[in-house]
Amino acid sequence: MQPSNPNTPRTGAYPEGGLAFPHRDLTGIGRLERHEILYLLDEAEQWVELNRQPQKRAGLLSGLTIINAFFENSTRTLLSFEIAGKRLGADVVNMHAATSSVKKGETLIDTAITLNAMRADAIVIRHASSGAVRLIAGKVDCPVLNAGDGQHEHPTQALLDALTIRHALHLPRGSDLCGLKVTICGDILHSRVARSNILSLTALGADVRVCAPPALLPAEIEAMGVTVFHDFDAALKGANIIMMLRLQQERMQGQFIPSPREYRHLYGLTLDRFARAEPDALVMHPGPMNRGIEIDSQVADHPTRSLITSQVESGVAIRMACLDVLTRRARGVPGWARTAGGAA
Amino acid sequence: MIPRPITIIGGRLVLAEGEPRPGAIRLVDGHIVALGDIAPEPDDAIIDAAGKLVTPGLVDLGVFAVDKPAFHFGGITRAALMPDQAPPLDHPARIRFAAQSGKPDMWVHPLAAATRGLEGREMAELALMREAGALAVATGRHWIGDSGVMLRLLSYCAMLGLMVVTHAEDEGVIGPAVATAGEMATRLGLPSAPAEAEALAVARDIALAELTGAHVHFRQVTTARALDLVRAAKVRGIRVTAGVTPAHFMLSDLELADFRTFSRMSPPLRQDADRLAVVDAIADGTIDVIASGHDPRGPEDKRLPFVDAEPGMAGAETLLPLTLTLVRDGRIDLARAFDLLAGAPARLLGVDAGVLRVGAEADIAIVDAERPWVVSSEKMAASAGNTPFDRRPVQGRVTALFKGGTRID
């Protein structure tokens, strides 16, 4: 179970105060340094513990308003952010603005300006277009958290996945994921979860493999530091962690695979296939799952080797950590106050 | 009113060949009547070019809007207007109207829409549009996907003697793409298509040009593979020509960082190897024309998520200075630069302009080729400031412009 290169705790390795996380927004893992990722993971540990207590409320963000602006349908991520905000004592408002028309952009900027005028203290955004969150971040005065933008990034998902792996392997605070072999299988092309996870896992030292038919792999993905596989069995050999992605047929324009049945034949994680990975390999899935297509129920519900429910648990803790860290400047937390130069 | 004859003295004339030659040029009744070692006649208005370049006014083969302030800033005296207007230029009356829309100080040469509504299905009334003033035909922003339609179009245009300006991207391959497949698009999570989409389209249209004898002009060729096809076709004597805009020889897809919508182009910006191939193709003559693709877009089209933004840049003002970078880098000489910008497009359109020659239309620019300035999207003459070259220092500025022998203020 332990990765080949055991880790030692690295607590105390972070820059002091606000320098530990000098960003105003969390728009993507691609903008973070390795130690900043580890800092957010470590900060989440306290919330994992709190969330397991009967009394789950912390008053840290009391009086602050957090707006969850979701321009794309979501159940679990929205719920996770809402619970995270509420457990920290903030007033959480959800705005559903599912978009359909192509020409939604000016509305998007107008919405951002409106939210800003309502003096939100943090805005959590999900949008169907890559880059939309950064566009909004440029128009508002408060921290912005990316809850998924198009096919670009879903940073809190990658963070919660890393935290889940650390817990499952009993790795202490400060640990990275050096030596771990992680196979990400599925629709990499359309997946923001895959992009954020590739960035985060490679930054943390894991050996990342991606596996999909060529049509579902983006060009030059190797440049992101991963090894490409088309054969799922080969990709599973030696893997410690298997991340299955949802077959996102709603995002596909044109036919990428002949049928879900055929996809399952080549890339479905059945119990048989699961046995080809390391004996103690663990399986993850960002949800919602297509049971019987990319993952079989016996695997998804495996009592000891499925981390799928742990992922959901880590999600709340990670989002609490992100909301806490990003609002520290506004809350005037010592060491985090805005500097004269307006750093970060 | 017949304008007073003008003699521009003290300039360096950029002729069709060779280094710029010190001399004067005399403009009478809208035409060049003498040039070289000449003296002004009595009563001529005399303009001293003070050692600057005297060049033909630019002939811009492919713009999407009639934007006079930008054209005049950029030294453009004639522009071929793409048929992608609202409504499209697919009717003789619209061609006639568009052809008049720039006069007197700017000539607009409308390109006839190849198909009704630019939908790529039924041919438009091309002979009637030729009668109304269309000098060439264009497929617009898109490729004609149906090879049968394209075959019939080209054979008809071959008969009419009309060049067909085409957009070269295989639409089945590009689908919803907004970027070239590669590391940049992958990291940004943008829908992308392989650069080979261009070569596929170019290959088909070269085959159809050979079959029909029609003249096909690829408005923009931006990839090494497609340029190789054009190069080989020219060797074989097929009537194909190629153009490009400065974005594709100056910029690569790295400009897409931060989802900058001003860098969203059609075709999309390519990887750097293709950019370098474009520069080589300009130098070796594979590319015939450099055009602006002028397409001013306001915030309602550009201040959007990248995927939702419209492609295109306001390019008229930067066309000349960016082309001059190729001269400064030693890739082409000044004579060739102005052939790319004026001579060749005029020949393709069949107009007697774009060159300093006795008898030609007196469309003249005085150019300070060294003058430095900084591109600013805030301060452009164009109707919108969507330029990926914002804040870039450039050299070369038009200091005086004459259309048909009359100075434009």
Image (cartoon, grey):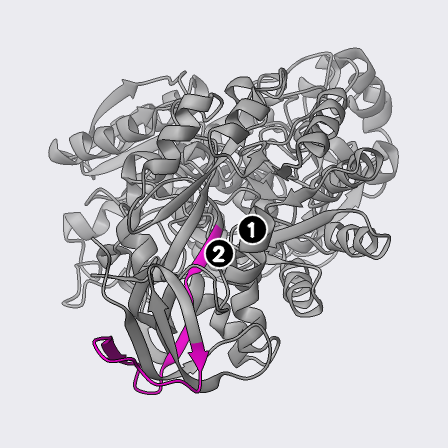
Q: Nearer the viewer, residue A112 or B291?
A: B291
Q: Which residues are magenta?
A: B35-60
Residue B156 within the segment the image draws in magenta: no
In the picture shown, does residue A128 fall above or below B66? above
Question: Looking at the rendering, which quadrant does residue B215 occupy?
Answer: top right
Q: Where is residue A50? Give x, y as percent.
A: 35, 34
Q: Which residue is mark 2?
A: B255
Count numbered badges in the picture: 2
Q: Amino acid at mark 1?
A: Leu
Q: Amino acid at mark 2?
A: Glu
Q: Which residue is mark 1?
A: B269
Give the letter of the chain under mark 1: B
The reply to whether dot 1 and dot 2 touch (C-beta < 8 Å) is yes
Does A100 sit left or right of A34 as displayed?
left
In the picture shown, does residue B156 fall above or below A5? above
Between marks 1 and 2 in the image, the one whose residue lies nearer the viewer:
1
Question: Looking at the rendering, which quadrant does residue A82 occupy?
Answer: top left
Is disc 2 placed on a helix, strand or loop? helix
- Residue at coordinates 77% horizontally, 13% vertically from top-left? A259
Q: Are marks 1 and 2 on the same chain?
A: yes
Does B35 sit left or right of B348 as displayed?
left
Give the letter of the chain under mark 2: B
Does A324 sit left or right of B11 as displayed?
left
